[in-house]
Amino acid sequence: MSDIKRILYIEDNPQNMRLVGKILKVNGYDMVGALSGLEGVELAIAQKPDLILMDINLPDIDGMEATRRIKAVQSLAHVPVIALTAAAMRGDRERILNAGCDDYLQKPIDTVQMMETIRRQLARVEAMNSFLLTGD
Ligand code: MN
């Protein structure tokens, strides 16, 4: 069994998709990409990723609606969702967190901050899982 974590990136901008794909690969993660919210929800269900990066402005359902649908699936409810939002959406932080996103990053993407956030969220899930297993 592989220990490589798989990250689903839901993003309609192909340049961002390529850039983030390279960064994740360099950092030892696998990336699966979806170009729309609905495709993203389907892929999340099919692939059960370890973490989801969620663009908010998407061509069909937005990232908040996609997050709500993903979090409503019991087997995905624990998967961290990190929202990526355009600067124009500053102030919508509450709405994004209320939709069920676990964390929030602003575009343009700061790659160091993004990797820190990904590692922190994955560590949080692992700590939660080991707590559930051991009862410590
Ligand atoms: Mn977008």
Image (cartoon, rainbow, N blue to C red):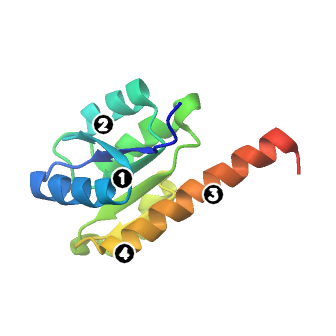
Q: Earlier in the sequence, mark 3 or mark 4?
A: 4
Marks 3 and 2 in Cβ contact (< 8 Å)? no
Q: Is residue 102 left or right of residue 52?
A: right
| SS label for mark 2 | helix
In 3D space, how far apart are the residues under numbered discs 3 and 4 (Cα atoms)? 18 Å
Q: Give the residue pinned by disc 2.
A: 40
Q: Amino acid at mark 1?
A: Leu
In 3D space, how far apart are the residues under numbered discs 2 and 1 (Cα atoms)? 10 Å
Measuring 20% from the left and 48% from the top, which residue is drawn there?
A: 58
Discs 3/4, front: 4
Marks 3 and 4 in Cβ contact (< 8 Å)? no
User: Residue 122 occupies which quadrant of the picture?
Assistant: bottom right
Q: Give the residue pinned by disc 3.
A: 124
In 3D space, how far apart are the residues under numbered discs 3 and 2 (Cα atoms)? 23 Å
Compared with 108, 41 (above or below) is above
Compared with 44, 136 (above or below) is below
Marks 2 and 4 in Cβ contact (< 8 Å)? no
Tag shown at residue 112: 4
Q: Residues within 10 Å of mark 3 (few under 14, many from 20)?
A: few
Q: Position of residue 52 (x, y in %)?
A: 40, 47
Count of all numbered marks drawn on residues in the image: 4
